[in-house]
Image (cartoon, rainbow, N blue to C red):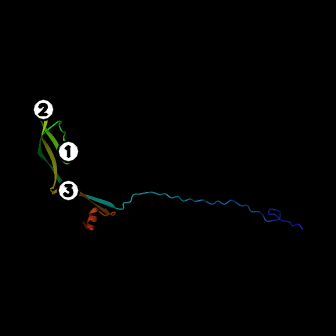
């Protein structure tokens, strides 16, 4: 058995509706960011120079030279060179003497020794020092009010 299906729009059936497109507005929000300077406080900086005395101990060195004459009194063939033995510098002193023949005669040596002494002379000297004080104030507060509110140390 065959069924008959009626389609809309066929004669004698319900009328077909027309579908109209709907218009939906699309909204977009935009953000604008701006900057501004806002005072949150102030800083007061005071710099002072303070003078005080300080004891310093600076070592002073003094060297003394001692010369000792050591007689040798002997004939030699060649002139000895200046030499150092320990902390003593030895400088030969020569003279020519006539005998039947001419020969070198070592008359003496100079033995030179250095001594170093350290002495201390503590002295008071003037020393300068800078000190810095930083105070923060809130908006509307004057530096004079901030000083009165906080005790100084």
Residue 60 — which label? Answer: none
- Spatial CA distance of label 2 from label 3 is 70 Å
Mark 1 surroundings: few (<14), some (14-19) or many (≥20) residues within 10 A: few
- Spatial CA distance of label 2 from label 1 is 29 Å
Q: Which of the two residues, 31 or 72, is positioned nearer the viewer here?
A: 72
Residue drawn at 17 percent across, 44 percent down: 89
**Picture coordinates of residue 24, whole percent (x, y):** 63, 60
Which sits earlier in the primary sequence, circle 2 or circle 1?
1
Q: Which residue is mark 1?
A: 84
**Picture coordinates of residue 83, whole percent (x, y):** 19, 42
Residue drawn at 16 percent across, 47 percent down: 113
Q: Is residue 39 left or right of residue 86?
A: right
- SS state under label 2: strand
Which residue lies most toward the front here? Answer: 100
In the image, is residue 142 above or below residue 85? below
Residue drawn at 28 percent across, 62 percent down: 143
- SS state under label 1: strand
Which sits earlier in the primary sequence, circle 3 or circle 1?
1
Write down the quadrant of residue 28 in the picture: bottom right
Q: Which residue is mark 2?
A: 102
**Picture coordinates of residue 118, whole percent (x, y):** 16, 54
Residue 127 — which label? Answer: 3
Camera-near label (2 vs 3) is 2
- Spatial CA distance of label 3 from label 1 is 46 Å
Q: Label 1 near label 2: C-beta < 8 Å?
A: no
């Amino acid at each position: 058995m065959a069924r008959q299906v009626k389609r809309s729009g066929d004669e004698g059936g319900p009328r077909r509706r027309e579908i109209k497109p709907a218009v939906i507005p699309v909204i977009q929000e935009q953000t604008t960011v701006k900057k501004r300077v806002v005072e949150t406080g102030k800083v007061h900086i005071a710099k002072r120079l303070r003078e005080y005395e300080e004891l310093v101990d600076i070592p002073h060195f003094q060297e003394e030279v001692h010369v000792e004459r050591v007689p040798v009194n002997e004939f030699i063939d060649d002139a000895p060179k200046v030499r150092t033995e320990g902390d003593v510098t030895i400088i030969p002193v020569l003279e020519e003497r006539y005998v039947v023949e001419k020969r070198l005669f070592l008359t003496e040596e100079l033995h030179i020794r250095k001594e170093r002494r350290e002495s201390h002379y503590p002295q008071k000297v003037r020393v300068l020092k800078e000190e810095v004080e930083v105070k923060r104030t809130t908006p509307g507060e004057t530096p004079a009010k901030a000083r009165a509110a906080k005790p100084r140390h």
